[in-house]
Amino acid sequence: MEITPAHARELEKQKQRKAALQGECAAAFEGVDRILFEAGCGHGHWLTSYAETHPEQTCVGIDLISWRIRKGLDKREKRQLENLHFFKAELGEFLEVLPERMRFDMTVLLFPDPWPKAKHHRRRMVQTAFLDEVARRTDQGGRFCFRSDDLPYYEWTVEHLEAHPEWEIDSAAEWPHEMETYFQEMMDGYHSVVARRV
């Protein structure tokens, strides 16, 4: 299949983007091999609060929107939290360039875009391949925490976790850290699930 000039330019931009992100990760994670990972960190309210409360834990958040990352970095600098990192990154690219040694103590998804139309379900962050990769980087007992105001997406996530051989839903588990986020303040209610790596 012949690659068009436009496709070639996009591939080159992607290559440069991943190389830059790889460099940022290498610099930020020198001497670090365990993290709490929040995919789609928004303005960084929840992750900043968690990092402030748990200074022993290296906390990492990613988001696709630049100004959200800037807000997160402002919070980090204001509170001088050396254990907190934010990156502008697409989920797949971040997982691809993250140093292989990195382990996830916990993965958190707070109010991710539910992509409600069936034709868009493939864009949801919770997919079998994503759960595979997170499981690969998570030791036994590590947690996967999901919260959404969208009941169909919550049910989708529960179904995917129940079907996955390396995750087990822990119905007795408490949410790891309560801190009302910008998005949570707008919600009438929400649904949470915590799973553990088996």
Image: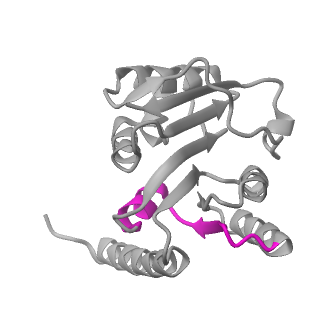
* The one of 2 and 184 positioned closer to us in this rendering: 184
* The one of 81 and 21 positioned closer to us in this rendering: 81
Relative height, residue 12 to residue 164 (above, below) = below
Q: Quadrant of residue 164?
A: top left
Q: Residue at x 64, y 67 (%)?
A: 86
Q: Is residue 110 left or right of residue 102?
A: right
Q: Residue at x 43, y 76 (%)?
A: 22
Q: Is residue 160 left or right of residue 182?
A: left
Span highlighted in magenta in the image:
80-98
Q: Position of residue 25 (x, y in %)?
A: 49, 74
Q: Residue at x 68, y 37 (%)?
A: 176
Q: Position of residue 35 (x, y in %)?
A: 53, 57
Direction front: furthest residue: 56
Q: Position of residue 167 (x, y in %)?
A: 40, 29
Relative height, residue 134 to residue 99 (above, below) = above
Q: Position of residue 49 (x, y in %)?
A: 79, 53
Image quarter hosting the N terminus: bottom left
Relative height, residue 34 to residue 119 (above, below) = below
Q: Residue at x 48, y 40 (%)?
A: 142
